[in-house]
Amino acid sequence: MTDALRDEVRAWLAAHWTGPAADEAAARAWLAKVVEARWAVPRWPVEWGGRALPDAEARIIEAEFAALGAPGTGQDRTNLYANTLLAFGTQALKERLLLRMLRGEVPMCLLYSEPNAGSDLAGLRCRAERRDGQWVVNGQKVWTSYAAVAEYGMLVARTDWDAPKHRGISFFFCPMRQPGVEVRPLRQITGESRFNEVFLTDALIPEENLLGQPGQGWAVLQTALAYERSVMGEAARGPRSGVAEGTGEPPLIALAREAGRLGDPVLRQDLARVLAYRALNALNTARAKADLAQGTSSPLMSLGKLAMSRILHEEARLRTAILGPESLFEGPEHPRAEDANFLTLNAYFTSIGGGTDQIQRNIIGERVLGLPREPEVDRDLPFRQVRSQ
Amino acid sequence: MTDALRDEVRAWLAAHWTGPAADEAAARAWLAKVVEARWAVPRWPVEWGGRALPDAEARIIEAEFAALGAPGTGQDRTNLYANTLLAFGTQALKERLLLRMLRGEVPMCLLYSEPNAGSDLAGLRCRAERRDGQWVVNGQKVWTSYAAVAEYGMLVARTDWDAPKHRGISFFFCPMRQPGVEVRPLRQITGESRFNEVFLTDALIPEENLLGQPGQGWAVLQTALAYERSVMGEAARGPRSGVAEGTGEPPLIALAREAGRLGDPVLRQDLARVLAYRALNALNTARAKADLAQGTSSPLMSLGKLAMSRILHEEARLRTAILGPESLFEGPEHPRAEDANFLTLNAYFTSIGGGTDQIQRNIIGERVLGLPREPEVDRDLPFRQVRSQ
Amino acid sequence: MAGIGREEALAFRDQLRRLLAARAGEAELRRVMETPAGYDPTLWRQLAELGLVGLVVEAAHGGTGAGPVALELAMEEVGAALLPGPLLGSGVLAAGLVAALGDEATAARLLPGIADGSRIAAAAITGPAGSWTEAGVAVEAVPDGGGWTLSGTASFVLHGQNADLLLVAARTAEGIAVFEADPRAAGLVVAALPCFDHSLRIAEIRFTGAPARRLGGRPGWAAVEAALDLAQVAMAGEQAGAGRRVLEMTVEYAKTRIQFGRPIGSFQAIKHMAADLLLEAESAISAARHAAEALEGRAVGAGAAVHLAGFACAEAFATIAATAIQMHGGIAFTWDHPAHLYLRRARADVQLLGAPAWHRERYLQALGA
Amino acid sequence: MAGIGREEALAFRDQLRRLLAARAGEAELRRVMETPAGYDPTLWRQLAELGLVGLVVEAAHGGTGAGPVALELAMEEVGAALLPGPLLGSGVLAAGLVAALGDEATAARLLPGIADGSRIAAAAITGPAGSWTEAGVAVEAVPDGGGWTLSGTASFVLHGQNADLLLVAARTAEGIAVFEADPRAAGLVVAALPCFDHSLRIAEIRFTGAPARRLGGRPGWAAVEAALDLAQVAMAGEQAGAGRRVLEMTVEYAKTRIQFGRPIGSFQAIKHMAADLLLEAESAISAARHAAEALEGRAVGAGAAVHLAGFACAEAFATIAATAIQMHGGIAFTWDHPAHLYLRRARADVQLLGAPAWHRERYLQALGA
């Protein structure tokens, strides 16, 4: 059975794969072929382009694709938008979007965080009201990547203000290309603008774009976040310059060598300590994957983000220490300083974004170690009565 | 006026001070003289052996005593037992004990903490009931120094189980030499026994030994604790051996020199870092005193204990690093290892005792920085309903 | 150094605070830091009139005649406001260097213009490696007729690109001496170095036979060290003041930012970070003030006090500024929030006059180890 | 090294866990650690019968024939129980040294007694300075008739005072060689060194012309290094297991200890410490297991893996044990609470086979830096 599957996918790849796509059109064309051949989502039901295969067999397909560097399969694990839609979408919405999403034709964005709902996402105040057979949305979202190009945003909004905070939220696919949606780039401390603020003013959403039932959006969101987490964590950004990175050595060693500091005994201790953080995290991640492969749940998964936060902050600190006064500078003539400074600031993307380190420690303490939750003053109050800014 | 006072105390000291007491009897005799001459508590009312002097003049007396190394004055600042008694005691109890206490004739101990009331002292469960004109006490106290020799213990016990936790506590001078009081030495992690457990079984306390009103013991305790704090903080214990301490250098530098490690650049960085902790705390303390002298309240006072905790833990860590494998050993042939190991363990005396570092950070956050308190689940409940172990 | 009295110093500090509150807010900082000069000449004149620019210049030479203690106090305010400009480079380091030379004629000629703010002086001391020791000097001076010519490179020159007057430490046959050079002279090029802290101005100066005038008085390196100590104490005050201010801002935010139905400052995670930072902030203030007192009293052990402040204040400010962003959360990850301005300044200050590891080593040496 | 399969290793681990739970509890530890020998001979025999003592000895020489991976797993249990005794010194380091020499006759003569627990062997490697490098060896061997005599001092000898057999690294004209000596022979004195960790036994051995037999096979220092790597991995497992156990105890306490009307583990101060410690504990386990796998597979880069475990596991255990006391509060400041037993062991382990700073330096070298 598995041999037959391996043969089949190999044969198909041999017949179709011609190497990395030269442009976006070619990439889409490839995806369309993968979808048509039912390789995109092998674990999914046949009805939606899948093969209803068990995980072990789907991994065979992924392995064969990976061996050639061919993209497109495994979207039943990694495509957070499509998986969320499959699990909670209406028949109409699925028919309209699902295959297009697998073919990479539907740029998406996430409309979750708000200025006053960051760590406490369930405290969100963006409002959606049902009016004349559609939903009308008003509010503000923030930290939205790709908002300007997205066709839909996955949106959480409050639809019931008398229910407790977690129970009055609904989940939507919000059309982004409409007058009620205004996107403003948000400049980060790094000077880049990779995120946006999104202002929703009487933005309209068709009824069929509601995922799950009204008021059950929190559960839908948890599913979407779980898909997001399983993809994230490996996505931390490295240096911008590429200086001292191409030698095969660990980048920090290469940097210290290049800066003539590798003989400094104080720095050497620091270097070993910081290199160990990344090495240990890689070992933890490998153990977590091995545990999962054996069906054992692993506490290690939850630790990855917290560990990565320390890695990034510490690596940036060490780069600065290696460079010394050179770190004062910026600009194209000072690429090593650019890196150290950029990485210093961008480390907060990991220690704050997607749940701060502090929230992460709560989660580890409570969900992994089983420590009791704090008393929550607002958990069961009707949301109208919850204290806000 | 102040010159006259200075002359008076100088003349008196010239006439009476003959140098440090040779034994305990001589020490007591000296204290008796100091009390008789009204130097012991110059800020106190005349009625109780004082001179009703303002602080600035009392400090002149303290300075003159200090110049000769003569003890006995300033007890109106430092004698926590006598000050508590003066402020809250009944006339009868004051008449019986106050002057004896100033003369050092009343060994005392503190009966505050309980096995289940440590950080949360107001959660104490030692019970005192009024019966036949006296108080009957049952319960257990812990972390009591000098319990075996004390004549009285300052005791907090619960007298009202229907009041909220802070409002059902009363404060007593509990006679220690009675059958209902059993003292058991408590061995610490250092191997020493400087503390005791005290078991109270129908222990009896005369009515006049109640300080303040029944149920107002928490306020009395706060006063007593304030006196205790102002004395503590400088009381952290140093090395036991005296090795490498007599050179005039900072002890850590002397130790590193003696161990032949002073040239190690990694250790030198560590050394500077750790020496700075103590130096900065001394500067902070000096600033706090200067602020106080100018009548400005200082946030620095509250920081001293937290700072000292870090100093002691870090100094012990560094001693260990200096010694390396020598730190494995103990016993009289390895005095430097004895020190490093003892100080490592004893550092917890400061980071846990008298309010853990964590409680200390709460206090600093709330009382100094004005950050809001946490929701307290048990604050206003009748104590009977408070969750316990 | 003489020094004004404590009351006077406090009164000056309060005046300065009011002026900065009115004229040197965040919006002004953001505007000015993107201009080439990096400071506001109008405000600079006002500060000079107030007496800040000539604070440590003797009254005889047109200054305020205050000592390190008053300077440090004032710098706490300067730091809190993240005031950009040539104060540290011209008013403290360069003025301090001229004063430290102890040559009356030179002082009378150069100090009045520095003190009244009409001339910006820059001290060019260390080379491109940025080591603040005698060995770090990378300019050589050669006698040339009646004068001298300079060759080599000086870097990390504070406001070198804005200077009217250069004071250059250069190597001669008899050791380091201090020279006066004209930044517009032939034989030298002043190149601005782009800084991660946009409110900072640093230049590299390449000398290729530039004419210079040798300044007399105390031996050159001793004078440089005295000026560096003064600048270090001033920067320590700046760091202490900035650290305290950014902590105050953060605590204020933690009191008002509501998440989970209560202020985030009520959570131990935030509260305990704030408590730890308060210890850092107060220790930095103690260290900076102590170093100032030691310098003012020319106390034995002043070296230890200066280097203790050198690393303790730098690291305290850096720690507070870095942790403040974490405590704020997402809002401080935006360009428009001031938190990163403090972090950028903190990172600059850590390197500006010697990194913490260097100050630690010097501290230990000063303690006899 | 060969190694048994994963299933078998897990089954062995479970058996061991049950035996330790039944026979090696805290009360037993406290009793045994105050006896001179420092271990329970009866339990020792049981552990030998189970196969623990000869775990890494080939089956041909009476052992279990397991490799580093199974050893590491077992040591996690040993560490969790703080099992005292000569396992690391005799069953791992000394047995590993004999095996590493690769001389079949020596192995056949010495290993069976070590493996079945009837002989306690001790490896005397480093001198009083405690440096685990070739230069640290402080015993010299001189040919004497057909045999050799040893002079000098070896220290940090695990269970040297309990040994029936000494394996001594000593300097010869051709480099370090390994010698066999009888601890009861004339010309040597075994002195027990009192340890802060009462469950540890360490001796110093002074040789003054003691007779010894030179062991053949692989060059001496290479064999010593192989044995040290094995011992380091075993101790890393011990540290990881002990760290995890003391964290579990602490988390359990935090769930049940009520202060302010709720479990202390519901406070962020405690919860966040626990979360941070979990990262340390899990990282230690990963590091120890990875080092064992690298050693078992004789992987390129095994040196880096061993030294990474060398400092990561030591510091993780020390951090967890130290923080656990703080998290417990007063109760853990008492002699009768087990927390300090873990801290004492952690402090010992940090020093036993080279301090963290040394392992960090070696790690960096192994990475090519």
Image: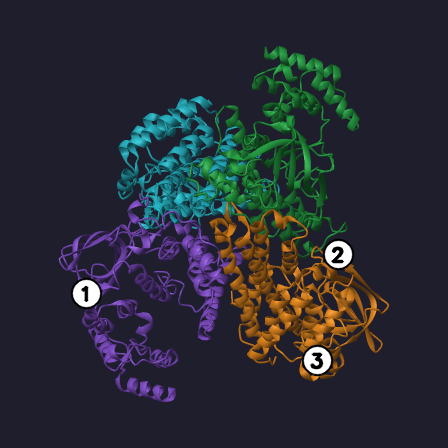
Chain colours: A green, B purple, C orange, D cyan
Callout 2: few (<14), some (14-19), or many (20+) C-alpha neighbours within 10 Å?
some
The amino acid type of the residue labelled 3 equals Gly
Q: Are marks 1 and 3 in contact (CB under 8 Å)?
A: no
Give the answer, above or below, for where A196 lies relative to A53: below
| Quarter holding residue B241 | bottom left
As helix, strand or loop, the secondary structure at mark 1 comes to helix
Tell me the CA gap for discs 2 and 3: 35 Å
The amino acid type of the residue labelled 2 equals Pro
In this rendering, the label closer to the viewer, 1 or 3: 1
Q: Which mark is residue C217?
A: 3
In this rendering, the label closer to the viewer, 1 or 2: 1
As helix, strand or loop, the secondary structure at mark 3 comes to loop
Q: x, y (%) of residue D236?
A: 45, 38
- Observer-nearest of D345 and A153: A153
Horizontal side, residue C344 vs residue B126: left or right: right
* Residue of label 1: B208
